[in-house]
Amino acid sequence: MKHEELIAIRRHLHQHPELSCEESETAAFIAEQLRGMGLAPEVGGYGAPTSVVATVVGDKAGPTHAWRADTDALPILEATGATYASCNAGVMHACGHDVHTTIGLGVAAGLVAQRGSLGGSVKLIFQPAEEGVPGSGVVGAEAMARGGVLNGVDAAFACHCHPPMRTGSIGYARGGIWAGSDAFRLTIRGRQSHGAYPQDGIDPIYVAAQLIVALQSIPGRVVDTRDSVVVSVGQVEAGNAFNVIPETASLVGMIRTLDEGVRERALTAFERLVDGICAAHGATPELTLSRGAVPVINDDALLDRALACLAPGLAVPVQPQMGAEDFASFSTRCPSVYFMLGVGDPDRGIVHPIHSPRFDVDEACLAFAVENFTDMLLRLGDSEG
């Protein structure tokens, strides 16, 4: 697939973003592209109504690999000013899933064109609802994994736009590369009183303030400083009058970790702090912990084989990301590798992070990714065949 074709596909997708579980037009477009390559895509299978899956079968024996691309967008009002900006006001491909989908289609076309050199097969998985939040139900990768999309798959691969890296590089990390994500909602129930007479009540705002500070003891006091953990309170809600101590205060936030053992220690400490601090002040906690994606862990042996199939100098080590990725539902079920793709160009101002209303990419990343990941999959299939 030519560079101009990849750009056209990416811009079409960027202009027509759809939110998680609403990607029906995106799915139809992907399926149309795959049919044009002579493939027979399956739409809406594996427990995900807006998914698309197609398999390229090589002419030689070999393993079955999967390449996953996510397709959903975010509820963000775009501010790039690009000629190809979103036509769906308030919805934007601010995480680069338009890029990921374009790469998946380019890889599919490249493999079809070189089917005679392909050992085994490659299953192209276009997955919806990656942006689903903890507690939103079984969607995205987990729904498709439970639906059997990985049946017969020997290894799975994916990549993500990484603006801090210039186009022309592929990043990798050993072990955890994306964090596990857990969300919490805590209501602290005290006793209302006049603001002038706080001794007559139980002040949930004061308790919340103590707890917000105490939660930051989890990194470094409960969890080893050499292990990654983030505890962030993103919302604080309490009261509606300047002179009244309210009955309740609410905290909403998240916990991110790169290791399952660290995750369990952090969650246990979180609950212990909530119970202890509330009890010390006579308040009652109502805590809901919603477990989201587990950490994405790269398989060391598979990573070594994949790196050996990339041209020398292309792959560079990167720091693990404390963001979360539901690809973990794949990486916990089969050997997997997740790459970071350089898409930045500081000279042109393409530096804004993912989930920013000004996020954009250097579109030279498209042909670069398609060429190198297609070649990697061909070489992997040949070496394991």
Image (cartoon, helix red, strand yellow):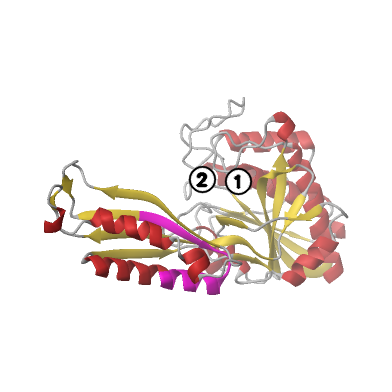
172 or 97, nearer to the observer: 172
* Residue 1 position within the rendered picture, expressed as x and y whole percent measured from the top left: 78, 42
Relative side of 204 to 325, left or right: left
Q: Secondary structure at mark 1?
A: helix
Residue 83 lies in quadrant: top right
Which callout, 1 or 2, points at the residue further toward the start of the chain? 2
Relative side of 60 to 356, left or right: right
Residue at the location (25% across, 70% down)? 279
Q: Secondary structure at mark 2?
A: helix
Residue at the location (58% across, 48% down)? 71
Find out whether residue 275 is within the magenta segment. no
Find out whether residue 262 is within the magenta segment. yes
Give how far apart the Cα atoms at labels 1 and 2 are. 15 Å
Question: Given the image, on which type of amino acid does mark 2 rest?
Answer: Ser
Label 2 CA crowd tier, 10 Å (few <14, some 14–19, many 20+)? some
Vertical arrangement, residue 104 with respect to residue 86, above or below: below
Quickly name the residue at label 2: 24
> In the image, which residues are magenta?
252-269
Vertical arrangement, residue 355 with respect to residue 303, above or below: above
Quickly name the residue at label 1: 97
Which one is closest to the eye, mark 1 or mark 2? 1
